[in-house]
């Protein structure tokens, strides 16, 4: 294993695990409306029902997309990244995609969300 592979592997794995750890309380509905933590779209603040529904959805999507982050992080340990600059740059910035996709999915859900009457 080279130093670049270890760095990329640790980064991806840690980011994935942190995202999963942050998403679990959202999925469980343990995070009420607050000023710092949770899915923070304007639709989320319309009611407590909206807050919990949107945060549960967002938390589930974040967990789903974090699993590949962890898997790719583990695989990265075994890649010869030091000698492949293009692959290294791709792997260096690609985690953003795995964070943006659930963000967009949750935003789309929030726009469509209508509380049960």
Image (cartoon, rainbow, N blue to C red):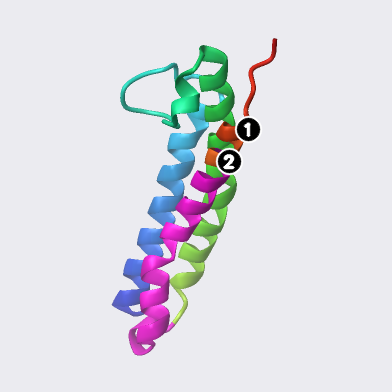
Q: Is residue 9 above or below residue 52?
A: below
Disc on res. 108: 2
Q: Which residues, given as a range, are shown in magenta? A: 80-106
Q: Nearer the viewer, residue 8 or 92?
A: 92
Predominant secondary structure, magenta span: helix
Quadrant holding the C terminus: top right
Q: Is residue 96 magenta?
A: yes
Q: Which of 44 and 31 is in front in this view?
A: 44
Q: In this view, does 68 lie to the left or right of 40?
A: right
Q: In this view, does 31 lie to the left or right of 113?
A: left
Quarter assignment of residue 37: top left
- Do the numbered discs 1 and 2 sit on residues whose CB atoms are within 8 Å? yes
* Residue ID at (49%, 17%): 46
Query: Separation of disc 1 and disc 2 at Cα?
Result: 6 Å
Q: In this view, does 33 lie above or below 19?
A: above
Quadrant holding the N terminus: bottom left
* Residue ID at (37%, 61%): 10
Check the image and name the residue furthest to the right: 117
Crowdedness of circle 1 by 10 Å Cα count: few (<14), some, many (20+)? Answer: few
Question: Please, what secondary structure does the residue beneath circle 2 have?
Answer: helix
Residue 27 visible within the image:
no
Residue under label 1:
112
* Residue ID at (60%, 36%): 109
Could you tell me residue 57's position as x and y percent?
A: 59, 33
Q: Nearer the viewer, residue 37 or 18?
A: 37
């Amino acid at each position: 294993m080279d130093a670049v592979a270890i760095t990329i592997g640790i980064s991806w794995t840690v980011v994935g695990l942190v995202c999963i750890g942050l998403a679990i309380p959202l999925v469980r509905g343990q995070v009420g409306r607050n000023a710092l933590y949770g899915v923070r779209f304007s639709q989320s603040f319309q009611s407590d029902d909206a807050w919990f529904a949107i945060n549960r959805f967002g938390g589930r999507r974040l967990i789903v997309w974090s699993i590949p982050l962890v898997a790719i992080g583990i695989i990265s340990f075994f890649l010869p990244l030091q000698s492949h600059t293009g692959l290294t740059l791709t792997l260096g910035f690609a985690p953003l995609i795995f964070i943006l996709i659930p963000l967009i999915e949750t935003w789309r859900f929030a726009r469509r969300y209508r509380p049960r009457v």
